[in-house]
């Protein structure tokens, strides 16, 4: 009869020494909405730079009187008023983007504070001195209201 290898002892490869455990470095990234806003800002600033170069070229004080001009490849708008229209239009987008980003940032910070209960604790507190320190609390007879008291 033929004997199968299952009865024979299995040969295993020699044991490798274990590598020391390496510390895992976890990179913290900005939230996706912050990265999206910054990417949008990059595009807006590129358009504003191109239209600004067009304003420079078309302005009679600078490039318009035969001074140093920027190649038309890098300009946007075609003439002075066109460059200004692009520039001011994208400046409004830049300001709007900044306002929305700040609003989202404040909302996120408030949510983090609310999750830990800090805001609710301060609002529910009856101790007003902890919420807002009194100015001149060290001086009982003098202070900004001493003249009013007579």
Image: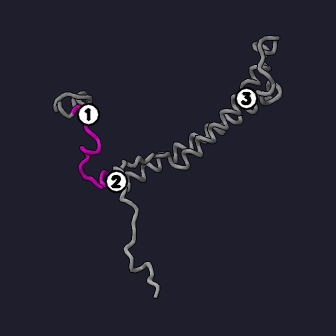
Camera-side mark, 1 or 3: 3
Query: Which quadrant holds residue 137?
Result: top left
Q: Residues within 10 Å of mark 3 (few under 14, many from 20)?
A: many
Distance from label 2 to label 1 (Cα)?
Answer: 68 Å
Q: Position of residue 85 (x, y in %)?
A: 76, 32
Name the residue: 37% across, 48% down: 22
Looking at the image, which residue is at 42% across and 50% down?
A: 110
Query: Tag 3 or tag 2, which sits nearer the N-term?
Result: 2
Q: CA distance from mark 1 to mark 3?
A: 53 Å
Residue holding disc 2: 17
Q: CA distance from mark 2 to mark 3?
A: 60 Å
The numbered mark, 1 or 3, whose residue comes first in the sequence reads 3
Which quarter of the image is occupied by the C terminus? top left
Residue beneath label 3, please? Answer: 50
Q: Position of residue 69 (x, y in %)?
A: 78, 17
Q: Identify the residue under disc 1.
A: 135
Mark 2, Cα crowd under 10 Å, few <14 / some 14-19 / many 20+, is few
**Foreground: 148 or 111?**
111
Q: Is residue 107 magenta?
A: no
Of all residues shown, which one is farthest toward the bottom? 1
Mark in front: 2 vs 1? 2
Q: Quadrant of residue 62?
A: top right
Q: Which of marks 1 and 2 precedes in the sequence?
A: 2
Residue 135 among those drawn in magenta: yes
Magenta residue span: 117-136
Q: What x and y, as percent, mark residue 89?
A: 71, 36
């Amino acid at each position: 009869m033929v004997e199968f290898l299952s009865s024979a002892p299995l040969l295993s490869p020699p044991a490798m020494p274990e590598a020391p455990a390496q510390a895992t470095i976890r990179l913290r990234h900005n939230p996706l909405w912050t990265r999206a806003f910054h990417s949008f800002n990059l595009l807006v600033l590129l358009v504003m730079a191109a239209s600004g170069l067009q304003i420079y070229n078309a302005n009679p004080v600078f490039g318009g009187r035969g001074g140093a001009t920027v190649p038309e490849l890098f300009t946007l708008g075609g003439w002075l008023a066109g460059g200004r229209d692009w520039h001011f239009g994208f400046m409004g987008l830049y300001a709007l983007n900044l306002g929305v980003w700040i609003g989202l940032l404040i909302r996120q910070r408030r949510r983090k504070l609310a999750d830990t209960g800090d805001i609710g604790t301060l609002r529910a507190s009856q101790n007003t001195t902890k919420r807002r320190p009194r100015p001149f609390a060290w001086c009982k007879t003098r202070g900004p209201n001493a003249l009013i008291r007579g």
